[in-house]
Image (spheres, rainbow, N blue to C red):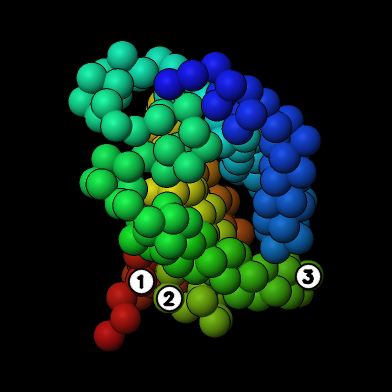
Amino acid sequence: MSEPAASSEYGLWVLVVLNSALFIIFAFSFAKPSKARDWTSFGAFSAFVIALFTEMYGFPLSIYFLSPWLASQFPDVNWLAHDSGHFWEMIFGWKDNPHFGPFHMVSLAFIVFGFSVLAWSWPILHAALRGGKLAKTGIYARLRHPQYAGFVLIMFGFLLQWPTILTLVMFPILVWMYVRLALKEERDAETEFGDEYRAYTAVTPRFWPRWR
């Protein structure tokens, strides 16, 4: 490991800003937060994205923190090279371009699927809110909180692609927060829609759909 590798392959703060902005704006275009709880969930997702890209292109804090162990266990890997941030490919000895590694491919599938869930759910929710009705068609007929599920899928995909200590700590905290927000929304919906909502919850799972 050498300082020139670190200085040449990290410290790319323009890429931190551009990539963070790209994914946050992209998510915003699907989520379109309007209520306070919407902004809370979107803000938490944005913090996760910023933390991720800060380590991906700016400063590899996790690599520095783990460098003694990594250097002793994997002496042939230059951990300050940017591609070495694809942690799982390096650990399991992937020799080719890590962007085509199995974990990277699976992570892309989760990220694309998560954004697809957001894109599918928003028009249905928006139409229901405008009409003062309960959203229970389309993807809402499969699960009650597809937007939160979409955010979790995207974050999990990023963890597979580029895990860091901070994002690994943030992930369960954000999942817990999304669950609490979902439960609060359910209490509000039951108050507003009464028996209609109770009948809906009786046949529709909260986060994980039943496909049969």
The answer to which image quadrant residue 211 occupies is bottom left
Q: Which residue lies under the disc numbered 2? A: 142
Q: Position of residue 193 (x, y in %)?
A: 57, 65
At 68% from the left and 51% from the top, the residue drawn is 23
At 36% from the left and 18% from the top, the residue drawn is 67
Q: Is residue 187 above or below residue 146?
A: above
Q: CA distance from mark 3 to mark 1?
A: 26 Å
Secondary structure under tag 1 reads loop
Disc 2 and disc 1 in contact, CB within 8 angstroms: yes
Q: Is residue 82 left or right of residue 203?
A: right
Q: Residues within 10 Å of mark 1 (few under 14, many from 20)?
A: some
At 36% from the left and 71% from the top, the residue drawn is 209
Q: Is residue 161 above or below residue 206?
A: above
Q: Position of residue 83 (x, y in %)?
A: 48, 42
Front residue of this view, candidates 207 and 203: 207
Secondary structure under tag 2 reads loop
Mark number, residue 130 = 3
* Amino acid type at mark 2: Arg
